[in-house]
Amino acid sequence: MKPVVGTVVSNKMQKSVVVAVDRLFHNKVYNRYVKRTSKFMAHDDKDECNIGDRVKLDHSRPLSKRKHWVVAEILKRARIYVPPPRTTTERVNKTEVPPNAS
């Protein structure tokens, strides 16, 4: 089978990820392109994939009941937002009343 490219939608399991693969096909009746999504479970041996990563999957022998794919490579990492650390001066006690409140 040829390798497929998809996006990681879940990485909650140990050494396993769920990858959504989109495909377009032409509907001859309506003369439109239709998008379909298939979800594949894949083996991620090093546990490197995060949600939103673009990965390439290779077919392998059956590893479990639903796992027949292996993550070959991570094509593009997802940009994950990390909020800046809060300082002690930014914290405001909610029980205090501001000085300009009536």
Image (cartoon, grey):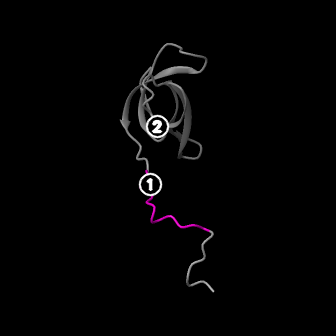
Residue 97: image quadrant is bottom right
Label 2 sits on a secondary structure element that is loop
Relative placement, left or right, of 20 versus 3 is: right
Q: Which mark is residue 45?
A: none
Relative placement, left or right, of 66 versus 48 is: right
Residue beneath label 1, please?
83
Residue appearing at x 43%, y 39% in the figure: 53
Label 1 sits on a secondary structure element that is loop
Q: Which mark is residue 50?
A: 2
User: Furthest residue to the bottom?
Assistant: 102
Mark 1 residue type: Pro
Q: Nearer the viewer, residue 31 or 7?
A: 7
Mark 2 residue type: Asn
Magenta region: 82-94
Residue appearing at x 46%, y 42% in the figure: 52
Q: Return the x and y of residue 70 as percentages of the image width and height.
A: 45, 22
Figure check: 58 above or below 91: above
Predominant secondary structure, magenta span: loop
- Dot 1, how many residues are within 10 Å of its Cα: few (below 14), some (14-19), or many (20+)? few
Residue appearing at x 46%, y 61% in the figure: 88
Real-space Cα separation, disc 2 to disc 1, in angstroms: 18 Å
Residue 88 falls inside the magenta stretch: yes
Residue 54 falls inside the magenta stretch: no
Q: Nearer the viewer, residue 16 or 21?
A: 16
Asked if the residue at tag 1 contacts the one at tag 2, i.e. Cβ–Cβ closer than 8 Å, the answer is no
